[in-house]
Amino acid sequence: MKFLKYNSNVCDRTYNELMLQLTKACPNSCSFCIDKFNHGVHGRPDFEAIKARILEYADKSTNITISGGEPLIYINEVLDLVKFIKKYTKLNITINTSIPYECYLHKTIYNEIVETVDSILLSAQHRVPEIADKIRKSKSKFDRNAFYKKLPHKEKYIVSLNIHKPYLCKLYDILRNIEFFYNLGFDNIKLAELFERPEMYVSISKLLGIKLPQPFAVQCSNKNVDISHLLPNFKGNLTIKTVCFIKSKNLKANFWDLFKTATRNLFRHKTYFFGVIQPDGNIYPYWI
């Protein structure tokens, strides 16, 4: 019971996936960053050890997510890594990034990375640069919105917006952000609830006036959510990521939620693989 309560992500249903936590380093210092609450390996990534580990587990997986920290502070090495993965495996590659200054300085390299991977989860934070800087607690060294506008392969991007107090918590502001990035050419938008900071939490379901299922019933990533009653001109794909960790007070999990999670895992017909690769190349495999 203790393991379920404090360690279970009850709803993502990650199927045969590798998560590469490439680095703990990041030029930003967002207050809600989940990475701040996780212990991991610090220091420069051992890219050769990482490649070896990916090859070892590639046949158990269908997807790999390259995350951090901010993975693209090692932009040259990441280009080499994604080319390696594409050459020697059949894994679909996703990169989680805030598009650091290195991408602006080395546009050609960054664009080659984008051409190589299958999808990019872009942590954009806010349409207003000054507010985005406050959220990141760092000053951008380039015009991000102008950079976003000229990005190729926008169909590969999912623009992620963290809904939280005090910066992005009003309905009008959220809708304007969705509209802004949609008008820049991004068809895929993701709104995410926070769970590690209760004082920052905002219920997206209540804010938008829509009913979303509990993650125990389906899962936490509700895709293609219809908000035509709020934004009639929005024709893109909206995903809403709700709180999904049993340990989160915002989910208000009770005994029956714990029971459903436990029995679902006990009677699941197939075992799935999920492995977390650390910067030193070590892997922490989990079967869920």
Image (spheres, grey):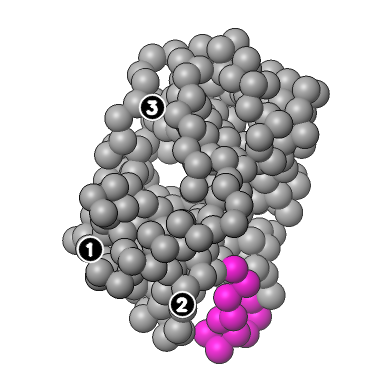
Taking 249 as reference, is 243 left or right?
A: right
Query: Dot 3: what SS?
Result: loop
State yes or no: discs 1 and 2 in contact (Cβ < 8 Å).
no
Q: Which quadrant of the figure has residue 166?
A: bottom left
Judge by depth and name the residue closer to the eye, 266 or 61.
266
Circle 3 is placed at which residue position? 24
Q: Please, which residue is most extreme toward the right here?
A: 87
Dot in front, 1 or 3: 1
How far is disc 1 from disc 3 in space, using C-alphas? 26 Å
Q: Position of residue 139 (x, y in %)?
A: 37, 37
Name the amino acid type tagged 2: Pro
Q: Please, which residue is most extreme toward the left here?
A: 199
Name the chief secondary structure element in magenta.
loop
Query: Which region shows up in magenta?
Result: 223-234
Badge 1 density bin: few <14, some 14–19, many ≥20, Cα 10 Å: few
Q: Which quadrant of the figure has residue 244?
A: bottom left
Of label 1 and label 3, which has the lower sequence position?
Answer: 3
Query: Dot 2: what SS?
Result: loop
Q: In the rendered view, tell whether residue 8 sits above or below residue 22.
A: below
Circle 2 is placed at which residue position? 213
Judge by depth and name the residue closer to the eye, 57 or 251.
57
Name the amino acid type tagged 3: Lys
Circle 1 is placed at which residue position? 249
Name the amino acid type tagged 1: Lys
State yes or no: discs 2 and 3 in contact (Cβ < 8 Å).
no
Q: Position of residue 121 (x, y in %)?
A: 57, 47
In the image, is residue 244 part of the stretch drawn in magenta?
no
Q: In the rendered view, tell whether residue 172 sits above or below residue 11.
A: below
Q: Which quadrant of the figure has residue 106?
A: top right
How far is disc 1 from disc 2 in space, using C-alphas? 17 Å
- At horizontal 60% and vertical 10% (from top left) the residue drawn is 48
Q: Position of residue 214 (x, y in %)?
A: 42, 74
